[in-house]
Amino acid sequence: MKNLNAIGLDNKKSKQLAEKLNVLLANYSIFYQNTRGYHWNIKGEKFFELHLKFEELYNDLLLKIDEVAERILTLGYAPNHRYSDYKTASKIKESTEVSNGMKAVEDILNSFKSIISLQRDLLALSAEANDEGTNALMSDYIRAQEKMVWMYSAFLNKA
């Protein structure tokens, strides 16, 4: 019992999960801010369509940021909160071109590729740790995001 955290998971495995979840949190945070930039700055013929889609996406990302941070806390660790840490830890980089809708959608698809890959890694870690809470969260995210990848790809005529 000494090596278990408050929810009955192994402390070492929980620490690994929390560290990886903090990497996911960093990626979600940069992805979120990029998407806000796309929403604010989009121009062109697809403005009305993409402006709304980007708002839907950043609202979804904001919920996930909170859920991931709370999962880290549930595991007994502290979520990182500084953008300087996020910029270092994130595979997703800050977008510099935010007014071109097609470029923004390509960036979103690349961001999903990074996010989904991290979540698959977390699925393996959480299964090994017998952490059903993290496992269920990642599984739900992946399922929904795979559909979004299909839809954004179809928008670019890449599906």
Image (cartoon, helix red, strand yellow):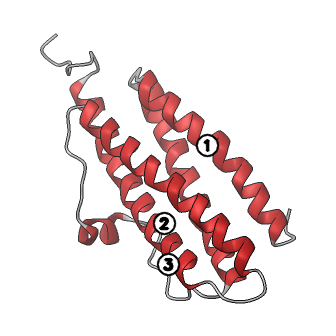
Vertical order, 133 against 115 (above or below): above
Q: CA distance from mark 1 to mark 3?
A: 24 Å
Residue lying at 50% horizontally and 81% vertically, measured from the top left = 95
SS state under label 2? helix
Q: Is residue 142 above or below residue 149?
A: above
Residue 109 visible to an observer of this rendering = no
Q: In this image, 32 relative to 82: left or right?
A: right
Label 3: state its secondary structure: helix
**Dot in front, 1 or 3:** 3
Q: Are marks 2 and 3 in contact (CB under 8 Å)?
A: no
Q: Residue 43 occupies which quadrant of the picture?
A: bottom right
Asked if labels 2 and 1 touch by Cβ distance under 8 angstroms, the answer is no
The residue lying at 74 percent from left, 71 percent from top is 49
Q: Earlier in the sequence, mark 1 or mark 3?
A: 3
- Residue corresponding to mark 3: 37
In the rendered image, is residue 31 in sight? yes
User: Mark 2 sits on what residue?
Assistant: 31
Disc 2 marks which amino acid? Phe
x and y, in percent, of residue 21 in the image: 36, 46
